[in-house]
Amino acid sequence: MERNNSIFAIIVTYNPDSYISENVESALKQVNRLLIIDNNSNESSKATLQKLSDNNQKIELILNNENIGLAAAQNLGLEKALFEQADWILLLDDDSQMNDNMATNMLTAYENHADKEQIAIIAPYIEEQNAKIEPKYMLSAGQLLFKRTGFGDKEILNNVLACIASGSLIKTSTIKELGLFKTQYFIDYIDTEFCLRVISANYKIIAVKNAILNHHLGEKTLHNVGEIRIPTSNHSAKRRFTIYRNRVWVWKKYLFKTPNYIFYDTLASFYDIFRIAAFEKEKFTKLKMVIKGLIVGLFKACK
């Protein structure tokens, strides 16, 4: 990679699965530097990560003595990327694997884009390995309007409102201007909050079809209702609390800045609650934690 497109990759790990070595290898082929930040995994996982680091000079490893949360761990990486003056920051989950040329295809789409100076984040085409569903993105269709769509015959989706962190390529200058991630969110809605911060600052997010990321999202399963397939994430009750608390924090902060996304996410929350009630295990416990999260998010401020 040329210097003017140098990429600093960040992977936060917590008891990664057996594919971590392959996932790291896929990243090393496409980035200039890779920082692995481990949030106090088990000893076996730490040994695997240490071996990976010892065997490649492009890798730096930070072993935290406790789970400091995803946002705080990612911020360690962001600060390191800023210090090393990388041009781009690539965020990856420990269960995400880059297809060949993913990073190159993202940068090519950026360089050829008419509004490239306004682009702050480039998102990939995400192939969910445990639920074969075409990825769809939420696009702005006006201040109060949105549309949820896949790529179809389009190579690039413009005016994306939000994307997940894994696989996203972020301009380092955007971090300098808009700041780090919100550590109080710990794990959920970190990426959504940052994306809406980007949109609120009049920057753009695009998604690129030929930039493919193989990704695992929790314990997602599919449920058939007639001809309709309904996915469920099957998060724990504890995660349901965090998701809905953070969801409300985002609603309160961005209601008048990105109302189209908040309108969409409000509708999505009703759909999510329906799926919990209809298909997931421990549904009553989870729904109780959803209500608790909504109440805490409403009355407790996020710093």
Image (cartoon, rainbow, N blue to C red):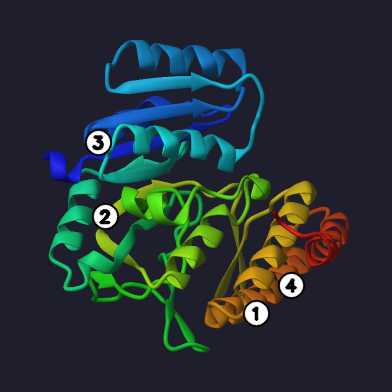
Residue at which label 2 appears? 211
The answer to whether residue 175 is left or right of residue 284 is: left
Precedes in sequence: disc 3 or disc 4: 3
4 or 2: mark nearer the eye: 2
Q: Tell which tag, 3 or 4, sits nearer the viewer.
A: 3
* Amino acid marked by disc 1: Leu
Tell me residue 112's x, y (percent): 13, 65
- Which badge, 4 or 2, comes first in the chain's sequence? 2
Q: Nearer the viewer, mark 2 or mark 3?
A: 3
> Looking at the image, which residue sits at the far front?
177
Between marks 3 and 1 in the image, the one whose residue lies nearer the viewer: 3
Left or right, 110 with reference to 66: left
Q: CA distance from mark 3 to mark 4?
A: 41 Å
Q: Name the residue tied to disc 4.
A: 274
Q: How far is disc 1 from disc 2 in space, using C-alphas?
A: 29 Å
Q: Could you tell me which residue is drawn at 34 percent across and 44 percent down?
A: 89
Q: Which residue is mark 1?
A: 267
N-term-proximal mark, 2 vs 3: 3
- Residue at horizontal 68%, vertical 68%? 272
User: Can you tell which quarter of the image residue 111 is in?
Assistant: bottom left
Q: What element does badge 2 sit on?
A: strand
Task: Quadrant for the C terminus, please.
Answer: bottom right
Q: Secondary structure at mark 3?
A: loop
Which is in the foreground here, disc 1 or disc 4? 1
Residue, disc 3: 31
Q: Position of residue 78 (x, y in %)?
A: 43, 39
